[in-house]
Image: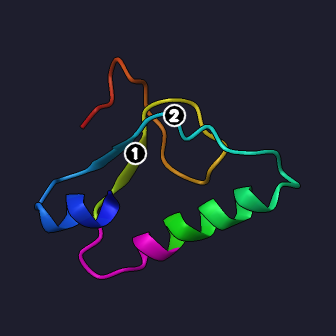
């Protein structure tokens, strides 16, 4: 989905429902690594979580994402 949004020339990727896993769950680390890798890719788009998340991402309210 992130690759599609990037190739479609979106301005920002809004993430909803990515609340995360427990701190000791390996899936938490894996997903955080995926977001980090994407953000280091040339031409990557800003990621913005619009629902609460434990991932190291910028967050905003779903009602006022301040785009």
Q: Residue at x 44, y 35 (%)?
A: 16
Most extreme residue toward the top is 63
Q: Residue at x 43, y 24 (%)?
A: 61
Classify residue 63 by image quadrant: top left
Mark 2, secondary structure of its residue:
loop
What is the magenta segment's predominant secondary structure? loop
Classify residue 64 by image quadrant: top left
Contact, mark 1 vs mark 2 (Cβ under 8 Å)? no
* Left or right of 27 in this view: 37: left
Most extreme residue toward the left is 9
Work out which quarter of the rendered image holds the C terminus and state it. Answer: top left
Q: Residue at x 48, y 39 (%)?
A: 59
> Mark 1 or mark 2, which is nearer to you?
2
Q: Which labelled disc corresponds to residue 48?
A: 1
Q: Which labelled disc corresponds to residue 17?
A: 2
Q: Position of residue 1 (x, y in %)?
A: 32, 57
Q: Is residue 57 magenta?
A: no
Disc 1/disc 2 C-alpha distance (Å): 12 Å
Disc 2: CA contacts within 10 A as few (<14), some (14-19) or many (>=20): few
Classify residue 52 by image quadrant: top right
Q: Residue at x 36, y 80 (%)?
A: 41
Q: Which residues are magenta?
A: 37-44
Mark 1, secondary structure of its residue:
strand
Q: Position of residue 51 (x, y in %)?
A: 50, 29
Q: Position of residue 43 (x, y in %)?
A: 23, 75
Q: Please say if 11 is above or below 19.
A: below
Between discs 1 and 2, the one toward the N terminus: 2
Q: Which labelled disc corresponds to residue 10?
A: none
Closer to the camera in the image, 41 or 21: 21
Q: Please say if 59 is above or below 35.
A: above
Q: Is residue 40 magenta?
A: yes
């Amino acid at each position: 989905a992130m690759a599609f949004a990037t190739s479609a020339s979106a301005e920002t990727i809004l993430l909803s429902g990515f609340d995360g896993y427990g701190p000791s769950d390996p899936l938490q680390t894996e997903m955080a690594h995926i977001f980090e890798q994407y953000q280091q890719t040339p031409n990557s788009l800003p990621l913005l979580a619009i629902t609460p998340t434990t991932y190291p991402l910028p967050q905003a309210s779903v009602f006022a994402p301040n785009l």
